[in-house]
Amino acid sequence: MTVLLVTQGGLQGDAIADPRPTIAQAKARLAKLEDKADQAVERYNEANESWKKKRKKYQELNADFKRQQERVLAMRSSIVGLAVTAYQGADALAMPGIAGGGDPLMTLNGLATLSQISKVRSEAMSGYEAEVKDLGARRDRAKTAFEEAADDREKFRKKRDEVEKLVTEQERLLRRLGTYNAGNTNSTGLKYTGPASGNARTALQFAYSQIGKPYRYGGTGPGVWDCSGLTQAAWRAAGVELPRTTTQQWAWGANRRVSMDDLQPGDLLFSNGLGHVGVYAGDGKMVHAPRTGDVVKVVTLSSYGMGRFVGAVRP
C-alpha cells in the first residue's frame, strides 16, 4: 500500500511506503507462521508419499503389461502358424485380421472362424483368447494407475507451492530479526551422553550426530532434515522402521502411546495438530528439526511449551 500527499497544488512528491514491521510484529507473525508451516509441510509430505506410491504402482503394472504383451504377441505368431498349416495351398495370410498388424485383439477377431479347425487348434485359440482378455485387463489397470499417479503429482505440486510461499515469508522475517541460521550440512553433531539405553540410545546417538544440520521441508538427510525425516532416520538406525510423515508415525503408534508423565528417552513427542515431532532425550529435553531457518537442536520441553504436545509414542 502507498500513500500520496495532496496539497493545494495537487499530488506532492513520491509515494511514501508503509513502514517496516516492528521487531515485536515480526516475532508475532513468525509465531503464527510456524504452526501454519508445520501443517503445510505435513500435507506436502503426505502428498509426496502418495505420489511416490502411485507412481511405483503404475511402473510395476506397466512393466507387467508389457511382459504380458510380449507373451501374447508370441502366441499370436504361433496361432498364425497353425492357420497357415491348416490352409495349405490357400492364401491364409491374406485373410483379414490374421496377420493382424501386431494387434492381438485384431488377430483374435480374424481367427474366430479358425477355432473349429481341430481340437488342438481350438485349445490353442482358447488359450490365446484368455491371454488377450487378461492383457486388456492389465492394460486397463496400468492406465488407471497412471491417471491416479498424474492426479497425485498435481496435488503434490500444489502443496509444494503452498510450502514455498510460507518458507519465503519465514526466511524474510528471520533475516529481519537477525536469527536466520543456515546451519552446516556437514555438521558432525554432538555425542549423546543422556540416560537412554538399548535401541533408544542408538536412535538418540543418531539424532545427536545430526545436530547443527539445517532444517529443510521434505528433508530426509543426510545433509538436511525435516522433523519426521529425522525421527524416521534415527529409529531406522536403531532397527525400527517408522512411516515417513508425522501423521503416519502417530497412527503407527496407536498401540504404543505413553503418558507425558511417563516419558522415557527415545519416545516420540507430537505437537498439537500433528504438525511436528521430536525425540525425547531425557532430563526434560527433546532433540528435533524445528523449522525453516533453524537447525537440528536440543531444547527443553519447558521452552518448547508443554501445552503444545498432544502426546507421545514409544517405538
Image (spheres, grey):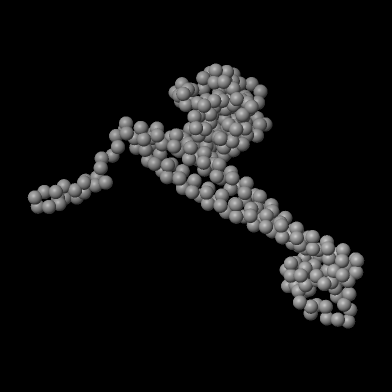
Would residue 123 be visible to someone looking at this image?
A: yes
Q: Is residue 31 above or below residue 7?
A: above
The one of 230 and 212 positioned closer to us in this rendering: 230
Q: Residue furthest right?
A: 119
The one of 191 and 70 positioned closer to us in this rendering: 70
Residue depicted at x 91% and y 66%: 119
Residue depicted at x 59% and y 38%: 244
Residue depicted at x 60% and y 55%: 147
Give the side of residue 15 with respect to residue 285, left or right.
left
Q: Is residue 180 above or below residue 72?
A: above
Q: Quadrant of residue 150?
A: bottom right
Q: Could you say where residue 228 lies in the image, as x and y percent from the top left?
A: 55, 35
Q: Quadrant of residue 142?
A: bottom right
Q: Could you say where residue 261 lies in the image, as x and y percent from the top left?
A: 55, 18
Residue depicted at x 62% and y 51%: 55
Give the side of residue 127 with respect to residue 188, left or right.
right
Give the side of residue 210 with respect to residue 3, left or right.
right
Would residue 178 be visible to someone looking at this image?
A: no
The one of 77 and 121 positioned closer to us in this rendering: 121
Q: Which quarter of the rendered picture does the C terminus lie within?
A: top right
